[in-house]
Image (cartoon, rainbow, N blue to C red):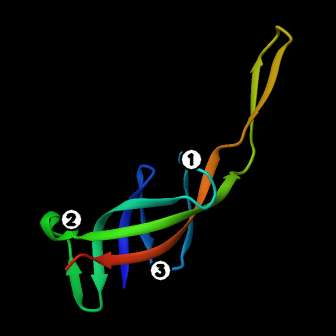
Amino acid sequence: MYAIVRAGGRQEKVAVDDVLTVDKLAGEAGDSIKLQPLLVVDGDNVISKAAELAKFEITAEIVGAVKGPKINIMHYRNKTGYKRRMGHRQPYTEVKITGIASGK
């Protein structure tokens, strides 16, 4: 069984015990969160209707905060002596999927 969930503006394919990296979420390590399902696949059954998806609950646990790769930015203007170096590292949150449950 797996599901497609909305996580931080993107769609991610998740199954139980998967660890994924999403945009930074509010919360501490060990906190439990719920993700919104967009599609649930259970064997041959594909559930995509909004009324049926409302019965499903996808729970996850925050593992911790991580940072993405460093991006180097260089501003330069010709013949003026202007140079400026900057860097950026995007903050992310690692999340472990703990359950995909239906409220049947």
Q: Residue at x 42, y 68 (%)?
A: 59
Distance between the Cα atoms at labels 1 and 3? 21 Å
Quickly name the residue at label 2.
54
Q: Secondary structure at mark 2?
A: loop
**Quadrant of the rendered image containing residue 93:** bottom right
Count of number-bearing discs? 3
- Judge from the rendering whether residue 91 lies leftward or rightward of residue 74; answer left or right: left
Q: Position of residue 99 (x, y in %)?
A: 43, 76
Q: CA distance from mark 3 to mark 2?
A: 19 Å
The numbered mark, 2 or 1, whose residue comes first in the sequence reads 1
Whole-percent x, y for residue 55 in the image: 21, 70
- Residue under numbered circle 3: 16
Q: Where is residue 42 drawn, in percent x and y?
A: 29, 86
Q: Residues within 10 Å of mark 3 (few under 14, many from 20)?
A: some
Residue depicted at x 21% and y 68%: 53
Q: Residues within 10 Å of mark 1 (few under 14, many from 20)?
A: some
The quadrant in which the C terminus is found is: bottom left
Residue 2 is tagged as: none
Quarter-of-image position of residue 18: bottom right
Q: Nearer the viewer, residue 36 or 13?
A: 36
Q: Residue beneath label 1, please?
A: 24
Relative depth, front residue between 9 and 56: 56
| Residue kind at label 1, given as amino acid type | Lys
Which residue occupies the foreground of this view, 61 or 79? 61
Mark 2, mark 1: which one is toward the viewer?
A: 2
Residue drawn at 56 percent across, 47 percent down: 24
Q: Mark 2 and mark 1: span between their CA atoms?
A: 25 Å
Relative to 2, is 84 above or below? above
Q: The residue under label 3 is which amino acid type?
A: Val
Residue shown at the point (33%, 77%) measured from the top left = 101
Q: Is residue 9 above or below residue 103?
A: above
Q: Position of residue 79 (x, y in %)?
A: 82, 10
